[in-house]
């Protein structure tokens, strides 16, 4: 199949998204953009959030982890489920009680303006890095396997895709995204299931026989029982739980869709339904990874982990399946970028510019400023994606979760201190604590996981041996895993405690 034909289907898919955006954004206003007029259907939100939650990273990277780590990623997924329970029954009631448009308004209610803006700034920084990393991964796959043959550069591909996303989000915002995410999730899951069915049929296997073969090869192992390992099951489950609490429950992008649902009860039904579906879908991605590992061995395919799924889909499957894979990959790309652009625009306008508090700005002026901020974030996305290409890191899923541990830790500390403590915070000092905690935690993690940093960023020099010796002396064989986020949040909490005082009786 020619790259030109695949590209034609991509353009056709984008035109479909534009049609949906045009239909859903009619008579929209700033309230539609920010929270969908609080009239979103909970079932659509639950289904559409699957695409946002999984993104291209899950679509490409998770199957690639099976060959080296079996099904151990599912430990993190189990943690996700427990995290969603906390979101549904602890965080959502709080957001609905305060009738929030931005969830970071809670910090203003509880502590003051500086804590409020600090929380918003950490969200913006975290979401920009996470969304651009996901965007880079999928655009890189498209460029290597399709666009390169058409002499389309990576930078041009990135520019065109971001322009596409701008065109269908700039007017309707959340109101549009609820519908486009539903459409994109449908295509993504359809692509995954079709690829699974094709590879199983091509190898002469059924679902049960595939699991038997994977089990004999030790690839269905879920739980890591080595307490010193960064992949130890308790670390992964607890880490996954707090990753969900922070990257979903304390994240404006994910929560603005939940609070766009009319009632708290419906929003809770959305989260619980979504959490169960996410577990099933992640298992299917791991199952697909096992199939790809078997198929790759049979065909002698030897490529980096993140390239395995695209290689098989585009070079070893029929043209129709290849088209479905590309559409599914695009469907995994757009939700992680369109929602991020919308949420970042909302947070910047509401939290930093104070748009909701500006009674002297009329609706037209607010709209003009919102559009300018929206376009500005698109430019920021473009520049950072090019930066990821320059670094050319292949293990994006590890990088995203590692970055989340540093950037979402202060948010976890702020919200936890607000909920668990009655103390009065010295508001103006909160930003210093929130900046110091991740820096300290990064230093600890760098020493503890120096081998990981060396592999990811190609570090070299005689000083590495000294750091490794120091690490073994301090930590022995113990490795910090995804629970890094908890340590960061705890350190932030302790710092906030020391700049607070008892509430007057």
Image: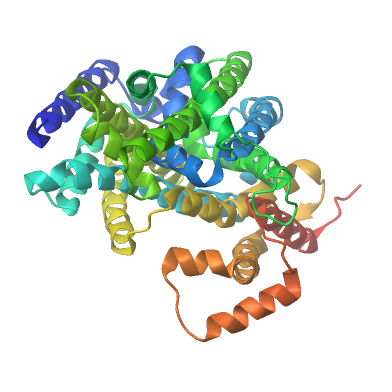
Identity of the residue drawn at 77% across and 59% down: 494
Above or below, 197 against 166 in this view is above
- Left or right of residue 183: residue 288: right
Identity of the residue drawn at 49% across and 24% down: 210
- Residue 28 appears at what percent x and percent y? 31, 22
Above or below, 174 against 371 in this view is above
- Left or right of residue 405: residue 372: left
Of 169 and 29, the residue lying toward us: 169
* Colouring of the image: rainbow
Identity of the residue drawn at 28% across and 21% down: 25
Q: Is residue 425 shown to the viewer in this render?
A: yes
> What is the quadrant of residue 299 in the picture?
top left
- Left or right of residue 152: residue 413: right
Above or below, 451 against 373 in this view is below
Quarter placement of the N terminus: top left
> What is the quadrant of residue 94 in the picture?
top right
Identity of the residue drawn at 15% across and 24% down: 12
- Residue 429 appears at what percent x and percent y? 66, 64
Residue closest to the far bottom = 462
Q: How many marks?
A: 0
Of 263 and 403, the residue lying toward us: 403
Residue closest to the far right = 505
Q: Is residue 260 shown to the viewer in this render?
A: no
Of 135 and 469, the residue lying toward us: 469
- Residue 78 appears at what percent x and percent y? 65, 32
- Left or right of residue 325: residue 8: left
Above or below, 277 against 104 in this view is above
- Residue 443 appears at what percent x and percent y? 61, 71
Of 381 and 261, the residue lying toward us: 381
């Amino acid at each position: 199949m020619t790259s030109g034909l695949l590209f034609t289907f991509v353009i056709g898919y984008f035109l479909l998204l534009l049609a949906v955006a045009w239909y859903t954004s009619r008579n929209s206003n700033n309230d539609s953009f920010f929270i969908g007029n609080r009239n979103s259907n909970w079932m659509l939100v639950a289904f559409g959030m699957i695409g946002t939650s999984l993104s291209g990273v899950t679509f490409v990277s998770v199957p690639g982890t099976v060959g080296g780590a079996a099904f151990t990623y599912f430990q993190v997924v189990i943690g996700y489920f427990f995290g969603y329970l906390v979101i549904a029954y602890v965080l959502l009631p709080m957001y609905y009680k305060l009738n929030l448009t931005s969830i970071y308004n809670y910090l203003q209610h509880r502590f003051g303006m500086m804590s409020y803006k600090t929380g918003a700034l950490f969200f913006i920084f975290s979401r920009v890095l996470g969304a651009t990393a996901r965007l880079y991964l999928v655009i890189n796959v498209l460029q290597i396997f399709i666009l390169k043959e058409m002499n389309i550069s990576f930078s041009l591909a990135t520019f065109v895709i971001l322009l596409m996303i701008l065109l269908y989000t700039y007017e309707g915002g959340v109101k549009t995204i609820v519908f486009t995410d539903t459409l994109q999730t449908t295509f993504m899951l359809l692509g995954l299931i079709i690829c699974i069915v094709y590879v199983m049929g091509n190898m002469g296997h059924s679902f049960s026989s595939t699991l038997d073969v994977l089990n004999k090869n030790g690839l269905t192992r879920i739980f890591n029982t080595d307490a010193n390992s960064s992949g130890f099951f308790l670390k992964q489950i607890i880490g996954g739980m707090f990753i969900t609490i922070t990257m979903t429950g304390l994240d404006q992008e994910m929560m603005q869709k939940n609070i766009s649902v009319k009632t708290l009860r419906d929003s809770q039904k959305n989260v619980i339904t979504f959490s169960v579906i996410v577990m099933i879908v992640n298992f299917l991605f791991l199952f697909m990874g096992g199939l790809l590992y078997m198929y790759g061995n049979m065909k002698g395919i030897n490529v980096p982990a993140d390239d395995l799924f695209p290689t098989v889909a585009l070079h070893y499957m029929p043209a129709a399946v290849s088209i479905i894979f590309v559409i599914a990959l695009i469907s995994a790309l757009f939700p992680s970028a369109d929602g991020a652009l919308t949420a970042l625009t909302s947070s910047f306008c509401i939290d930093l510019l104070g748009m909701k508090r500006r009674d002297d700005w009329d609706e037209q002026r607010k709209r003009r400023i919102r559009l300018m901020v929206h376009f500005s974030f698109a430019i920021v996305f473009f520049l950072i994606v090019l930066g990821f290409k320059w670094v050319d890191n292949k293990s994006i899923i590890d990088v995203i979760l590692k970055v989340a541990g540093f950037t979402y830790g202060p948010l976890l500390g702020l919200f936890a201190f607000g909920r668990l403590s009655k103390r009065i915070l010295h508001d103006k000092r909160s930003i210093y604590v929130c900046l110091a905690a991740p820096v300290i935690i990064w230093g600890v993690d760098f020493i503890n996981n120096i081998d990981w940093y060396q592999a990811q960023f190609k570090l070299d020099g005689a000083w590495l041996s000294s750091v490794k010796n120091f690490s073994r002396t301090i930590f022995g064989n113990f490795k910090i895993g995804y629970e890094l986020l908890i340590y960061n949040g705890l350190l932030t909490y302790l710092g906030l405690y020391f700049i607070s005082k008892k509430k007057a009786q």
